[in-house]
C-alpha cells in the first residue's frame, strides 16, 4: 500500500477523551473513530488489525474442530421469554419494535438463538458432539462505556456453543477450548492467566476468564506465582498443569486456598471466557435428542467467548512504548514501513520502489510512505503505528544501494543492502510467527 493513496488519518494532538494508552494510540494512529458513546467505526489501519485477530481465532478454532456459522445481529425476543432470560439482562439489552410491532433485540449473546437453531436440525446423539461458532457484532448498553474498544457498547465477539450427550464429553470439550484459547492468545503475543470465575447471567457452574495482565485492567486477579514464570517464558506447562494451579477472579478468591508466599495479585483485562453450561438452556427451551438406547436425552452445553475487538486494545496495552504501538508480527496491520526521505530524488525513488516490489513478491505487506511530508513527521508516524520493521531510504545511502533497517520492538538499526533487508525481514518474520 502506498500511503499517498491510503486513508490514515493520524492525529497530532493528544485526544482528551482517552484515559488509557491503547485508546489514545488507537485514536492517534487513525485506527478507530467514535460515532457515539461506545460505538466506533474501524478505519482501514484498525480494520487490518481486527481482521488479523479474527483470522487467528478462526484458524485455531477450526483446528480444534469448531464449525463456523453466522447468526443475525437481531433476534426476536420470544426466544428469550422461553429461556427465562428476557428480564435478566435488563437495560443492557437493546430492544425495539419492527413495523409489525414485533419486539426485536440486538444480540448481547446468542445462547437462545443457537439452541433454537440446533433443535431445528439435530435429532440424534449420532450428530453430537457439535461446536458451532461465529464472529459477530454484539450490543450491550453498558452503563459506562469507556476505554475505547475495550468496553464498547457495540463490539465484535467470537462466540462458540458446544452440544454434548453427557457431562463428561462437555468437560472434555471445555478443556480443549481452554487449550485452544491459550494457543490463540499466545499467537497474538499475549500470555493469559485463566482464572476460575463466576458464571454471572450466563449460568452454569464451571467457568474460566482469560485475563491479560495490565495495570489498566478492570478485573482483580489472584494467581499462583508459577504464572509469572510462564509469562516470563521461563516455564511451559500443559493445559492440565495450568488448570491445576490456583487462579481466581475477585469474587472467587479464597485466601486459604493458596499459601501466602505463592499468591500473586494483579489487574487483568478479560479477553475470553469459557463456560460449562450444563442443561440450563436445553432444558428451559425443551430440547432433546434421541440417545443410544432410544430414550430422549437433554444435551449438555458449553459456551465460549472471545472479545475480538477488545483484543486490539489489549494487545496495545501489553505492547507499546512512549512513541506508539509495537505490534506483534502476527497481528501487525502491515509487515514493514518504507520511509522515502526525499521523494523525487531518483536514487531514493528507485530504491524504495525496489524494496516495495521485493517485499510484495516475498508475500509481505509493505506500507510505503511516499508522501512529501518531512522526515521527522514520517518517523513519528511509523513509530506510532508500530509496524514491526521500518526501512528508511535517504539520498546518501540510496546512491550506494543501501537502506537503514530498524526493528521497532528494540529500536535496533543497521545499514544494509536492499536484498539483505528483504531477506532479513522475511527470515525473522517466519521465525517469529513459528515461535
Ligand atoms: P466483562 O466482565 O468485561 O463485562 P462479560 O463477562 O460481560 O465481560 P462475556 O459475556 O463473557 O463478557 O463476553 C465474552 C467476551 O466478550 C469477554 O470475555 C470480553 O472479552 C468481551 N466483552 C464483553 N463485554 C464487552 C464490551 N462491552 N466491550 C468489548 N468487549 C466485551
Ligand atoms: Mg465474563
Image (cartoon, rainbow, N blue to C red):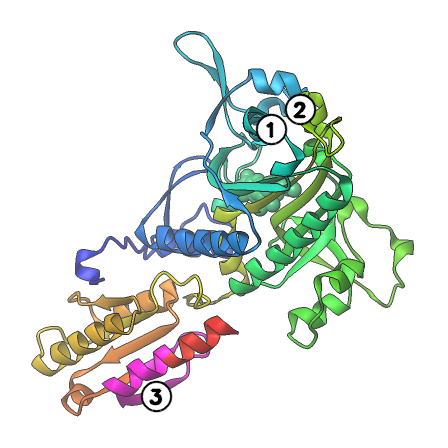
Q: Of residues 156 and 116, which is closer to you in this image? A: 116
Q: Residue at x 39, y 71 (%)?
A: 388
Alpha-carbon span between mark 1 and mark 2: 8 Å
Q: Of residues 140 and 321, which is closer to you in this image? A: 140
For the N terminus, give its image quadrant. bottom left
Q: Position of residue 353 (x, y in %)?
A: 16, 74
Q: Position of residue 425 (x, y in %)?
A: 35, 79
Q: Residue at x 47, y 49 (%)?
A: 18
- Say if disc 3 is inside 8 Å of ligand 1: no
Where is mark 2, residue-wise? 287
* Label 1–label 2 contact, CB within 8 A: yes
Q: Of residues 12 and 369, which is closer to you in this image? A: 369
Q: Is residue 268 visible?
A: no
Q: Which element type, helix, strand or loop, lies under badge 2? A: loop
User: Is 130 in the magenta?
Assistant: no
Q: Which residues are magenta?
A: 405-426
Point out the frontmost of discs 2 and 3.
Answer: 2
- Horizontally, residue 227 falls left or right of residue 376, namely right
- Say if disc 1 is inside 8 Å of ligand 1: no
Where is mark 3, residue-wise? 414
Amino acid at each position: 500500500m502506498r500511503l499517498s493513496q491510503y486513508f490514515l488519518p493520524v492525529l497530532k494532538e493528544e485526544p482528551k477523551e482517552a484515559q488509557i494508552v491503547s485508546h489514545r494510540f488507537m485514536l492517534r494512529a487513525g485506527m478507530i473513530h467514535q460515532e457515539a458513546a461506545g460505538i466506533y467505526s474501524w478505519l482501514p489501519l484498525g480494520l487490518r488489525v481486527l481482521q488479523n485477530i479474527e483470522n487467528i481465532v478462526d484458524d485455531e478454532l477450526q483446528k480444534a474442530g469448531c464449525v463456523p456459522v453466522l447468526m443475525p445481529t437481531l433476534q426476536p425476543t420470544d426466544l428469550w421469554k422461553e429461556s427465562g432470560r428476557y428480564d435478566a439482562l435488563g437495560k443492557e439489552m437493546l430492544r425495539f419494535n419492527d413495523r409489525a410491532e414485533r419486539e426485536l433485540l440486538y444480540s448481547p449473546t446468542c445462547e437462545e438463538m443457537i439452541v433454537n437453531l440446533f433443535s431445528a436440525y439435530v435429532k440424534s446423539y449420532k450428530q453430537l458432539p457439535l461446536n458451532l461458532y461465529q464472529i459477530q457484532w454484539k450490543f450491550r448498553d453498558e452503563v459506562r462505556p469507556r476505554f475505547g474498544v475495550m468496553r464498547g457498547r457495540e463490539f465484535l465477539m467470537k462466540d462458540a456453543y458446544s452440544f454434548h450427550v453427557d457431562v463428561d464429553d462437555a468437560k472434555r470439550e471445555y478443556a480443549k477450548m481452554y487449550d485452544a484459547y491459550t494457543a490463540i492468545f499466545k499467537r497474538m503475543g499475549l500470555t493469559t492467566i485463566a482464572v476460575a470465575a463466576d458464571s454471572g447471567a450466563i449460568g452454569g457452574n464451571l467457568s474460566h476468564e482469560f485475563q491479560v495482565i495490565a495495570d489498566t485492567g478492570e478485573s482483580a486477579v489472584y494467581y499462583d506465582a508459577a504464572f509469572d514464570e510462564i509469562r516470563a517464558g521461563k516455564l511451559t506447562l500443559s493445559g492440565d498443569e495450568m488448570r491445576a494451579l490456583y487462579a481466581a477472579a475477585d469474587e472467587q478468591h479464597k485466601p486459604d486456598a493458596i499459601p501466602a508466599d505463592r499468591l500473586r495479585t494483579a489487574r487483568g483485562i478479560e479477553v475470553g471466557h469459557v463456560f460449562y453450561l450444563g442443561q440450563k438452556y436445553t432444558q428451559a427451551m425443551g430440547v432433546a435428542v434421541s440417545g443410544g438406547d432410544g430414550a430422549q436425552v437433554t444435551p449438555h452445553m458449553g459456551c465460549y467467548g472471545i472479545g475480538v475487538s477488545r483484543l486490539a486494545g489489549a494487545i496495545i496495552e501489553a505492547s507499546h512504548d512512549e512513541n506508539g504501538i509495537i505490534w506483534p508480527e502476527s497481528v501487525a496491520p502491515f509487515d514493514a514501513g518504507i520511509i522515502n526521505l526525499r521523494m523525487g530524488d531518483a536514487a531514493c525513488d528507485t530504491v524504495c520502489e525496489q524494496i516495495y516490489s521485493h517485499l510484495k513478491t516475498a508475500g509481505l505487506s509493505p506500507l510505503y510512505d511516499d508522501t512529501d511530508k518531512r522526515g521527522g513527521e514520517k518517523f513519528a508516524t511509523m513509530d506510532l503505528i508500530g509496524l514491526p520493521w521500518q526501512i528508511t531510504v535517504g539520498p546518501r545511502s540510496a546512491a550506494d544501494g543501501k537502506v537503514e533497517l530498524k526493528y521497532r520492538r528494540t529500536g535496533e538499526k543497521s545499514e544494509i543492502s536492499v536484498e539483505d533487508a528483504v531477506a532479513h525481514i522475511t527470515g525473522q518474520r517466519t521465525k517469529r510467527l513459528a515461535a
